[in-house]
Structure formats: C-alpha cells, structure tokens
Amino acid sequence: MSSQSISAMARGMVGSEILRIAGNVRTLQAQGRTVCNFTVGDFAPSQFPIPEALRDAAIESYSAGRTNYPPAEGVLALRKAVLAHYEKRLGLRYPLESIQIISGARPGLYAAYGVLIDPGETVIYPVPSWNNNHYAYLCGAKAIEVPTRPEDGFLPTAALLEPFIQEARLISINSPLNPAGTMISPEELRKISELIVNENTRRKELGLRLLYLVYDQIYWELQLGDIRHVTPIEVMPEMAAYTIFIDGISKSWAATGLRVGWVVAPPHITDRIKAFLNHVGAWAPHPEQEATAHILNSVEVLDDFYANMHNEVRARLNLIYNAVQEMKAAGLPVDAIAPQGAIYLSTQFDLVGKSLDGVPITSNAQIGDILLEQAGVALVPFQAFGLRQETGWMRLSVGAVSIADVEQCIPRMRAILERVK
C-alpha cells in the first residue's frame, strides 16, 4: 500500500527505540537466552504487586456492577480524594473544578499540549525526557530541546531555559525524572518558577498569550534518597496560575495496567482538557476509580504499601549502583548517578572511542547491543529520550527484575567491561 494513502502526520511519526530493544529481548528469550531486562518502565506483578486493598476494592466495585461510563470529569469520590491527598502530602489546596481524572498520565500530557499550543507555537523541554518530542510533533508545535548535563542530574536549570523563555508557550518538566531517576532541587525549581512568573508579568503588560508549565510528577511518591520532592507552587505560590500537574497511580502503586491518572490545574484549563479528552474517551475505568479513591482515603494502608515498595525498589537500585561504583574504582569505564527517585538508574558505559575484541565502538546503540547480545543485559540508551550525544549514558529500570536477576547480571556486565580496550 502506498504511503500516500495515509496522512502526512502519520507518515512523520517516529517509532519507539524502546520497543525496538524490547523486540530484540524477546528474540533472545525465544532462543532460550537469559536476559536481565532493565528496559521497561513497568512493574512485573511477581516482583511488585499492586496494593491488596486496591485489588479487593476494584473487585468489589466490579461485583457491584459499576461497569458503566464514569462521569466525564471523573468519579466524585476520587476527585475529592485527590484533593485531600494533595493537601495532606503536598500542602496544595485546589477547588474541585481543578481535578480531571484520566486513564493514566499519558492522555493528560497529550491533552495539555493540545489545549495550550497552537500549531507553530513553541514548547521547551529538556532532554533526556520521555515522549515530549512525540506530543510536540502531534500538536504541530515548534520543539526546542534543551540538552542537560550529568552534573545536574540531567535536569533542566533556569540558566539553560532562559534563552528560550520569551519564545515559549509551554515548558514541560518531569521530576523525579524518567529516564535519569533524579529529582529537581527546590533552589533550581524556584529559579525556573521565577523565570515563568516574570515572563508572564511581561506578557500581561503587552497583552500576549501566557506561558504555562506542565509538571509531570507521576513518580513523586517514589522518593528514595535525601532529596525531597517539591512543587512549583511550594517554592513560588504565584505558579498556581500557570502549573498543570500530571499524576496518577501507575508508578507509585505499581499499577500501570489499571490506567488511573489525573490532571490538577487552574479550572479553565481542566475544563478544556475534559472537553478534549471527551472526544477521545480517555476515561479511567469506573471500578478502578472507586478503588483508587478508597486507597487514597486509607492513609495507613497506603503508608504500609509505600514502606515495602520503596525498600524493594531501593534495594535493586542500590545493588546496581554500588556494583557500578566498585567497577569504577577498579578502573573500568563505567559510572552512575546515585538513585534519588522513580525506578531508574542513570548509568554510563564510557565505551565510545574504545574497542571490544578489535571492533571499534562508536555509538550508544552499539553499546546497548553488545551488552544485550554478549552479557544478556538489556538497557535503554538516552538517545531514546532525545539526548543526542554519544556518551554512553543508559537508563536501567528495576521494576521488572528481581534481586537475584540483578546479582546474576552484574558479573556478566563486568566481564564485558574488562575486555574493552
């Protein structure tokens, strides 16, 4: 079939590098190979089951026959529970009209782009980051990708964003960060917030369209180190008028398949997001919404779940991180950033410009292929998240691996690194 039979937009869509790697993993597994799969930003239920109370409440709701459409803005009990949760744990107070329930975080991100950006307007986002390039493309936006630095935890800084601030209609930031597993500091977030507030003061005087911040905090309840998660409104209350929060249960409750998320924003924004998503039908299932409300209102149940889950995630990340630091101390070309949040570890395999068995290594993709095919270790290069430099930085995700998996793969990684010249 000719490519002319589909739209120009569809012809221009870019495939997922992560899915390509996942296909290679499946091929090796089908051949009987053992693969430690650090690629997926998901959770193996055998390793990270959802809260039992969440499962039981969803079953009860299904048994009660609540399988019809939920309200377009979300089940009232869940919207109220989100408000209470944000006030208790984040110190944020919003009216009910600010809450829009959605089917996971992804539709909220896409809808925020769709309701704020006209074709040709500019969106700024740091790289590496997840999926901003695709949403910018789908909305016809002009994308300005701002490369970040490992010394900043691959997080944006005000100094990096400032040159583009007057042009932008939207800035998109994720913390804790997928893919790096790092968290923005209160000081840096305050500087970025000041840029946005000052720019909007200028625009109001000139009658220009305002600048908004999409703040994707889907991992915020997976805080693993000493850095505390902060919000733009905490560091600068004026940011309440310009911030769109994207959030949900997918990551913090290991509930990726239940598809419950939400947008929290000024009411005039959530009203348009609701209208946008009504035409897509991106509602979270009715029973899962009711079950989520039940858990949000069960503080002790939630805290017990977090304590266990955080210990399990931290154990896996620290095991890899410590092993990498031991290899680095032994003079091997590897490094990592200490884990701070989410389920990811930034790891550098500094092999570009070196060789393995006489074969030159020239790219992150080649490094990933070597580790997969020769060590049975599947990683995702930061190129899959928009970072173009071939510096060996990779994302390791621990949601689908056991402690034993990690212990078994470390010697295989080391053996490869010891052969590099």
Image (cartoon, rainbow, N blue to C red):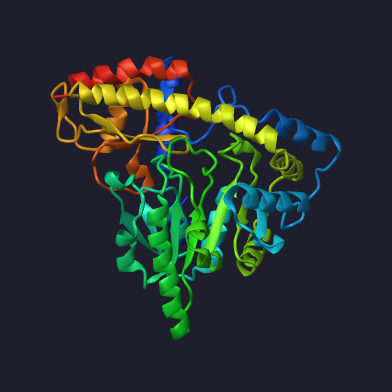
Q: Nearer the viewer, residue 205 or 89?
A: 89
Left or right placement of residue 381 versus residue 353 in this view: right
- The x and y percentages for residue 36 are 42, 22
Measuring 23% from the left and 22% from the top, which residue is drawn there? 417
Considering only vertical position in the picture, is 174 above or below 93?
above
- The x and y percentages for residue 390 are 24, 42
Q: Nearer the viewer, residue 20 or 341?
A: 341
- The x and y percentages for residue 71 are 77, 55
- The x and y percentages for residue 240 are 55, 64
- Quadrant in the rendering for residue 355: top left
Measuring 39% from the left and 22% from the top, which residue is drawn there? 319
Q: Farthest right residue?
A: 64
Considering only vertical position in the picture, is 303 above or below 215?
above
Left or right placement of residue 71 versus residue 94 in this view: right
Measuring 69% from the left and 38% from the top, which residue is drawn there? 299
Q: Nearer the viewer, residue 215 or 365?
A: 215
Residue 70 in sight in this render:
no
Count of numbered marks: 0
- Quadrant in the rendering for residue 324: top left
Q: Nearer the viewer, residue 140 or 353?
A: 353
